[in-house]
Image (tube, coloured by chain):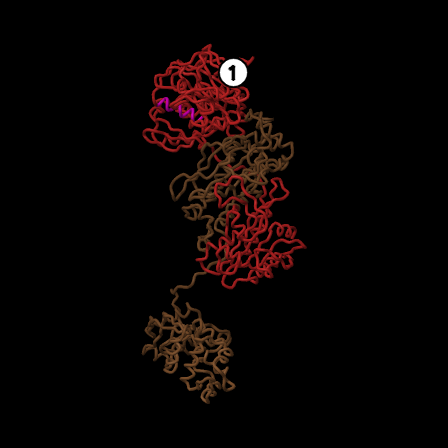
Amino acid sequence: MPTITLDRKEFEKLVGKRLPDDKLKDRISMLGTDLEEVNSKEILVEVFPDRPDMLSEQGFARAFSSFIVHKTGLRKYKVRKSGEKVIVDASVKEVRPFTACAIVKNLKLDDNRIKQLMQLQEKLHITFGRNRKKAAIGIYPLERIKMPITFKAMKPEDVKFKPLEYPKELNGLEVLQLHPKGKEFGKLLSGCKQFPFFVDAAGKILSMPPIINSDDVGKVETSTREVFIECSGFDFNTLKQCLHIIVAALADMGGDVYSMEILDGKNKEVTPHLEPAKLKMDLGYVNKILGLHLKESEMKKLLERMGFGYQNKHALIPAYRADVLHPVDVVEDVAIAYGYEHFQEEIPKISTIASEDAGIKMREKIAALLTGFGLLEISSYHLTNATEHRNASLQQEIIELANALNQDYHALRASLIPSLLKVFSENKHHEYPQKIFEIATCFEKGDSETGIVEKKKLCVGVTSANAGFTDVKQILDSVMMLMGMKYTLAEEEAASFIPGRCGKILVDGKTIGHLGEVHPQVLANFSLDYPVAMIEIDVDWLVKGLEGK
Amino acid sequence: MLPAIREHMTFSALLKESGLNNIEVMRALGWLESKKIIAIRKDAQERIELDVNGERYVKHGLPELRFLKALEKGHLPLDEIRAKADLDGNEASIALGVLKQKNAIVLGKIIALTTAGKELLKKKLPEEKFLESLPRDVASLHPEEAAIYSALKQRKQILKTQLLKEMYLHLTPLGHQLQKQKLHHELLERVTTAMIKEGGWKNKKFRRYDVKAEVPKLYPGRRHFTNEAVNYIRRIWLDMGFTEIDGGLIETSFWNFDALFTPQDHPAREMQDTFFIKNPALGKLPDAQIVNAVKNVHETGGKSGSLGWQYSWNAEEAKKNVLRTHTTVLTARTLAAIKKSQLPVKFFSVGKCFRNETLDWKHLFEFDQSEGIVVDEHGNFRNLLGYLKEFFHKMGFDKVRFRPAYFPYTSMSTEVDVFHPYHKKWVELGGAGLARPEVSVSLFGEDIPVLMWGLGIGRILTDYYMIKDIRELYKNDLKQLREMKVWLK
């Protein structure tokens, strides 16, 4: 989630009220943002991804001043007609089909405001714009641009321009190879034969979205009074929302918003459009899911504290709010305005009968028996690596992860034997005898929804200078006897165990596990000094066998 | 103990004779010493042990003995004796020297056995006896043994010595006096069967113990300490009438993300956050009805009254297998499985979840979560807060606070904080909310209140067990597991 930095003085000016630190902290938290830090100069807050409109000083202050009941209700933004046009050429449909644009005049920019504007642009790129894939934003000084503007795709090798903060002209392909932004976002244009460009009437390149503006026309400075703004991407609605968030912030800086005509083939769209949307509010629904008894007038007040308007049973939703998908989103804001701290918690008097999961219950019983034999339960990771698996001489295949960051844990374990041997090898300095067990999930390929079968296994390990087969057979015998299960043993050869000292455990003719003395080669692989005897059982089989007993 | 002590007796000798264990003997001696009945002197002793050749000679005989035996019949040349006795050049020359000195043989081209030599064959050589008596303390040797020791010491790798620390016991005058008084008849040691039957304890006293003396540590078999806590958490939910659910750790993205209205381009679904499986990379989607409901809700809001995410939903993306990133996947599956006639229902689960992280002191790639879900036609936000507050009260946190939050699958999303009584600050312990209509309509078929939460357990565990480095939770250090305090809640 993005963290933004607010200039405290500017923020307080925008809010129109100063709050003491503790009050400020509390209110910021209860508005639905995570406060990181407050000092005398700055406020650092984490804005949740559903509120991109709060990614600027202006947007945050707007929401905050309503919430603290200083300036409540719907903010009205006036949009004048500029009459200027942006022509969307058909060539762009293949690479980046849509744009929404606006002009803002009468701006008074200073260093802090430019910093804020860049922060908003950057944070919107990361979150709402999904790293510029979904939406990319360009802001340009209007005085350098000759209208109308064309949005079109051209062969990158044919287009030369000087990218922002770069000493010389490059062609489109060179930008991807040489410019830092080109290297970072070039993948968004990979495979495209033509790249999208904004070009003015004089043929000047404004930018190559979603990568970079030109140095010539693409740089906003403190002297800039009027700007052209474009958002480009793949979904027109998303771009409009993005544009609304930016122009609302600029309007709050004192700018005047002007619309533009977007000529897209036969379609003509006018952007931005800052009139609020209307959404029917059902007071009964609000009260039912919140567990409250609000009157309509109370709900209206609460809506106004979140920057909404309310008229004729409809909420008026500001154009900069990109998060309202369903009436429930407005209800959530009613709850935030009411204050989560003011809800009276209540457990309803309904009757439900509890029950444990049958498998977990049985595994708990087995664990209880094993601790009774003096065994210590361990708890190890489900992830393992091929070396550990091989060191235990296990034959089955292990399932690898596609993208593990840590190469020591790049696969799903197929058996608990390596996990227990690893524990022994890491505890050689502790008191012997060591008797341990674990009941946990192991993985193998098989027929299931995921193509992976998860098995709960029980593994017991005993080690000391004279540990042997008898130690584990006693445990197995006793557990089976106490649970009323009959089993037989048959000789088995398994690479992890000493030939002639390994048995398979059969219940109703099915093999449910093994026990034996671990092969000295395996012990050496794990740097162990003493013999180890082990049992590994498929517990799911045991649990199935116990059903109905 | 006292009657068994002899002058200049070693601790190990006493231990052997008494048949008691180390700590019992130590305790008794400690008591006797404190009463000035004995004195204990710690000393180092030179201990004689068999070296490599010595062990071989004990098994196969000393070279001189083998030489003699080979010569048993009378006269033989040296070569034949050597072959018969299997002696190398060095051993043969030593045997010759030793036997010559004992006048057992007469040297010449042919070596002859003397009468003295014949006598030697009739009984064990003193050297042989000496070797068999080892290990011995140098101080305990008789003069004749001392001579044998110094002779054998000269020979190659027969003997080795080791410096051993030992305790020597001495009776004080009071000790001698008490031994003479046969006080041991007065003091009783263990209670015996006969003693109980015959009343042999009557009019006698038991030896007093030093009840403050240290005893060896005893460790029980026990559960892993985190599971003690997990079982307590399970117990709380069960007490509150919740039914336990369990599920797989591998899920398709469909259940882990899509069914929970998480858009397919959501950052959580990227490679750096979630573990994907190399092979099988893709799983199967459930039946078409539910897949379509989820697809529609993403694209247009479907029947939920939502606008949806307004993009083209991709079934292939939903098939990707992942290690579940939250137990909330169980909530999705449960919502899809229950019927309206069963309501109200309450479920919980405690289980492992995964995120693609490297291990460090505050990050684990596996973590524990407790999931809860209440599906109740009359449920509301206040009820959600009620269940959560009760749970944390039972966990020992008196002050619980709810803050607005954001999750793709809930509205009235809230972060749950508890006030940590020890650190005196608010600690974030989980997320909760009411299922969004997009979730309840596509999975259950209708917009009903679904209260749900996913609570982190790791922080509660590290706080309770005073663990600073989260990796210590699953380090499996046996000393830590043996000695960790019990979950007392």
Residue at 54%, 35% in the rendered image: B451
Chain coloured red = A
Q: Residue furthest front?
A: B109
Report x, y in % for residue A19: 35, 27
Q: Closer to the camera, B408 or A180?
A: A180
Q: Which residue type carries mark 1? A: Val
Residue A118 falls inside the magenta stretch:
yes
Q: Residue furthest right?
A: A509
How many numbered marks appear?
A: 1
Chain coloured brown = B
Q: Closer to the camera, B380 or B443?
A: B443
Residue A337, can we see it? Answer: no
Residue B174 falls inside the magenta stretch:
no
To which residue does mark 1 refer?
A88
Report x, y in % for residue B332: 57, 36
Residue B281 found in image quarter? top right
Q: Closer to the camera, A423 or A62?
A: A423
Magenta stretch? A112-124
Q: Closer to the camera, A237 or B358?
A: B358
Q: From the viewer's perspective, is residue B362 above or below residue A473? A: above
Magenta stretch: helix, strand or loop mostly:
helix
The kind of secondary structure element at disc 1 is strand
Report x, y in % for residue B344: 59, 37
Please rate how many residues cluster around mark 1, counting C-alpha atoms within 10 Å: few if below 14, some from 14 to 19, many from 20: many
